[in-house]
């Protein structure tokens, strides 16, 4: 009877914690139960020595974006390490609410980029940008007095559940026009969260990478620059010469879509400076640059993972879900597929 009782408790906990993707979320109160989360059923997405993580941006389409819900998505995917976008942690710590409609803003920016924006939409975009600027100022003021104990509590909640935060990417923090206070806050918070590096879009501006490299040295943390289609094998060379704290957040999919030949070579040549690498399956320019379901594009994800395994590279590969989610599915289910792809490649 004693063994049956233990088996019953294990079954109850499994059913409680491993809820199918898209079903009712476990309640925030459960995350205050360290006796459950701290010791039971820790996730593991490290396969044959290669750490696979996810950027929490991948779950942006899920309705609940709270710290607790985001952790639930991560656990549902069996992931034990992440690159954390700032929103879940900052809202958990009391950041003022942003009422900006991001989908409307993104849609207008796409229209502006394509040249299809109307005069009325130009005015609407300008109004939204003004609102965003005012909100950014409000956030900067909040950050100056933000309670770091809330970020410590956030980290503990994630760590107790078996999830490590290896990178932190807060919004509007490390740009050319950000204040010293913003940059200090971002790097200080990253360390509180346990991250080894912060990530930011490569600014293509040498004074900015020099400035960020100096701040990174001050805080004893790396700043890893993310690239899109401006990536070339030499994009990071100046930044790397400026500071040993400047590094790469390589995006292999965007690198392929940019038309670079031999994408595995940049991993081999720059592996000592890569702190994390984004994984997605994009096509070459000749094939249309599409962002596709993994295994159907031109990005050598499988070969890259096997290279990391065979060469014993220690930086994590970060799942970034950017292809269109099929009808009837959701972000959690698609990230699960990406993790399964990685595990199979690394067997």
Image (tube, rainbow, N blue to C red):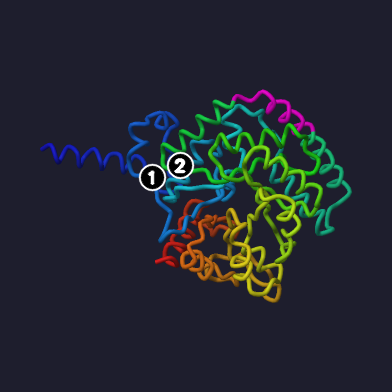
Screen quadrant of the N terminus: top left
Residue placed most toward the observer, 134 or 268:
268
Residue 287 coordinates in the image, percent (x, y): 67, 75
Q: CA distance from mark 2 to mark 1?
A: 9 Å
Residue at 77% x, 51% y is 203
Screen quadrant of the C terminus: bottom left
Residue at 56% x, 42% y is 195
Residue 326 falls within the magenta-colored stretch: no
Question: Disc 1 marks which residue?
Answer: 19
Q: Residue furthest left?
A: 1
Q: Counting residues from the N terminus, which is met first, the one under dot 2 or under dot 1?
A: 1
Residue 243 coordinates in the image, percent (x, y): 71, 50
Q: Are marks 2 and 1 in contact (CB under 8 Å)?
A: yes
Q: Which mark is residue 72?
A: 2
Residue 265 drawn above or below residue 180:
below
Q: How many dots with numbers?
A: 2
Horizontally, is 250 left or right of 106 in the view?
A: left
Disc 2 vs disc 1: which is toward the camera?
A: 2
Residue 188 coordinates in the image, percent (x, y): 63, 34
Residue at 45% x, 42% y is 72
**The residue tagged with tag 1: helix, strand or loop?**
loop
């Amino acid at each position: 009877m004693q063994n049956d009782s233990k088996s019953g408790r294990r079954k109850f906990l499994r059913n409680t914690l491993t809820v199918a993707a898209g079903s009712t979320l476990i309640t925030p109160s459960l995350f205050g139960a360290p006796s459950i989360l701290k010791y039971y059923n820790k996730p593991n997405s490290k396969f044959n020595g290669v750490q696979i993580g996810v950027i929490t941006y991948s779950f942006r389409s899920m309705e609940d974006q709270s710290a607790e819900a985001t952790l639930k998505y991560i656990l549902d995917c069996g992931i034990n390490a992440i690159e954390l976008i700032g929103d879940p942690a900052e809202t958990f710590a009391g950041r003022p609410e942003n009422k900006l409609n991001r989908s409307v803003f993104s849609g207008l920016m796409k229209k502006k980029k394509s040249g299809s924006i109307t005069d009325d939409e130009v005015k609407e975009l300008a109004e939204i940008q003004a609102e965003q600027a005012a909100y950014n100022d409000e956030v900067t003021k909040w950050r100056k007095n933000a309670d770091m104990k809330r970020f410590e509590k956030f980290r503990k909640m994630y760590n107790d559940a078996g999830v490590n935060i290896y990178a932190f990417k807060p919004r509007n923090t490390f740009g050319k026009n950000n204040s010293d206070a913003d940059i200090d806050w971002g790097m200080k918070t990253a360390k509180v969260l346990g991250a080894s590096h912060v990530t930011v879009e490569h600014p293509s501006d040498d004074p900015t990478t020099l400035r960020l490299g100096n701040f990174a040295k001050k805080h004893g943390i790396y700043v890893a620059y993310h690239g899109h289609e401006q990536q070339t094998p030499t994009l990071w060379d100046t930044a790397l010469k400026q500071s040993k704290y400047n590094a790469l957040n390589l995006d292999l999919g965007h690198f392929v879509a940019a038309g670079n030949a031999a994408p595995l070579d940049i991993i081999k040549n720059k592996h000592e400076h890569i702190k994390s690498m984004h994984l997605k399956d994009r096509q070459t320019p000749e094939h249309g640059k599409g962002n596709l379901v993994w295994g159907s594009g031109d990005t050598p994800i499988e070969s890259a993972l096997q290279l990391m395994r065979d060469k014993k590279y220690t930086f994590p590969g970060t799942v970034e879900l950017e292809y269109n989610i099929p009808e009837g599915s959701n972000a959690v289910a698609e990230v699960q597929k990406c993790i399964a792809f990685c595990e199979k490649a690394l067997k």
